[in-house]
Image (cartoon, helix red, strand yellow):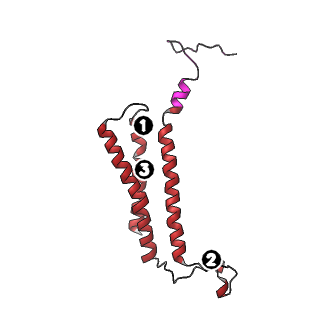
Amino acid sequence: MVALVASLVITAALLALLIPVSKRHPLGSPFTWGEAMVGATYSFFLMFWVYGVVPHLWLTWSGNELNWRPDKLLFGPWGVLKPQEFGGWFPITLNYQVLRDLIAVLIYVVFLGGQMALWAWWQKRGKKAEAAAQIEPTSDYGRPLVRKG
C-alpha cells in the first residue's frame, strides 16, 4: 500500500514539474541539444513510471495484501453480482482477479488519456496569448488602428 501511494505521489510530482518548465521555455524558441536530451530522458522516465511501475505496484498490492486471487469469488455489495450457480441472478461468475485486472486496465486508460491531454496542452501553450495579441492591429503607441462602432 505504501509503495503504491508513494508511486502515485511521485507521479503527481513528476507531472507538476512540467508546469514551471512550460512557462520557462517560450513557445517557438528552439531547443538546444542538451535540452532535447533532458526532455527525452524525462519523458521516457515518466512513461516508464506511469505505464510500468504504478500498474506493477497495484497488481502486487492487490495480489499479495488484498488476496485478490482467482479462487476468491466476487459477489459484490449485498450479493448483487452473485452468480447463478450460487443462487444469484448474475449469469457470469466473477472473481477478484478479474476485478484486479480491470482496475489495472483502467489505470492504463486513465494514464493514456492524461498523456494525450498533456500532449495537447503542451502543443497549445502560449497560443491563447498570441491569439489575443493578434485580434486587433495597433499602432506603435498601442492604440487600435480600427474604429469601433
Q: Residue 125: horizontal and vertical position, in percent?
A: 48, 37
Badge count: 3
Q: Is residue 52 above or below residue 44?
A: below
Q: Is residue 11 above or below residue 122?
A: below
- Kindly check if marks 2 and 3 are in contact, taking CB atoms under 8 A apart as contact: no
Residue at 51% over, 81% down = 70
- Kindly check if marks 2 and 1 are in contact, taking CB atoms under 8 A apart as contact: no
Specify the label residue 23 is tagged with: 1
Mark 3 residue element: helix
Residue span colored magenta: 128-149
State whether the magenta stretch is mostly helix, strand or loop. Answer: loop
Mark 1 or 3, nearer chain start: 3
Q: Is residue 121 above or below residue 89?
A: above
Which residue type carries mark 1?
Answer: Lys
Measured in 3D between alpha carbons, the distance from the residue under mark 2 to the one under mark 3, in whole angstroms, is: 35 Å
Q: Residue 143: horizontal and vertical position, in percent?
A: 55, 14
Q: Is residue 142 left or right of residue 12?
A: right
Measured in 3D between alpha carbons, the distance from the residue under mark 2 to the one under mark 1, in whole angstroms, is: 47 Å
How many residues crowd mark 3 within 10 Å: few (<14), some (14–19), many (20+)? few
Which residue type carries mark 2?
Answer: Pro
How many residues crowd mark 2 within 10 Å: few (<14), some (14–19), many (20+)? few
Residue for badge 3: 15
Residue for badge 2: 77
Which residue type carries mark 3?
Answer: Leu
